[in-house]
Amino acid sequence: MRITVDRDLCIGSGNCARIAPEIFDQDDNGLVTLLVTDAGAAFARVRQASAICPVGAVSLLQKESA
């Protein structure tokens, strides 16, 4: 699964960074920063971060096959 974030939607709640700190961080303004784009072994926590984001700024997308 590929992770995307919409920084324009982000309000800096930090839920994603608390749940999956190896995937998400926050910049100096508190907005989400994506550290990697592949959920890998952290899939369950990334899915949880997406589900609890109050504004839906975190998304998981099915990777397209080549």
Image (tube, grey):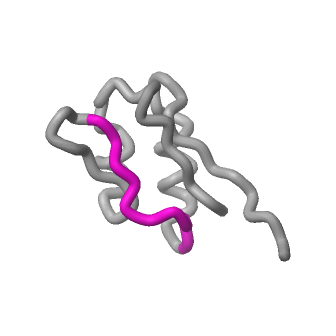
Residue located at (55% from left, 49% from top): 4
Residue located at (80% from left, 64% from top): 64
Snapshot quadrant of residue 11: top left
Query: In screen coordinates, is 27 left or right of 9?
Result: left
Q: In which quarter of the image is the C terminus?
A: bottom right
Q: Give the range drawn in magenta.
A: 31-40
Above or below residue 56? Residue 35 is below
Q: Which of 9 and 1 is in front in this view?
A: 9
Above or below residue 33? Residue 29 is above
Query: In screen coordinates, is 62 left or right of 26?
Result: right
Q: Main secondary structure of the magenta part?
A: loop
The answer to whether residue 37 is magenta is yes
Above or below residue 32? Residue 56 is above
Residue 10: x %, y % from top left: 40, 29
Residue located at (29% from left, 36% from top): 31
Residue 60: x %, y % from top left: 63, 50
Q: Which of 59 and 52 is in front in this view?
A: 59
Above or below residue 13? Residue 26 is below
Q: Which of 1 and 34 is in front in this view?
A: 34
Total count of labels = 0
Query: In screen coordinates, is 40 left or right of 16?
Result: right
The answer to whether residue 13 is magenta is no
Residue 12: x %, y % from top left: 29, 30
Residue 3: x %, y % from top left: 56, 55
Q: Quadrant of the N terminus?
A: bottom right
The residue sitting at the left extreme is 28
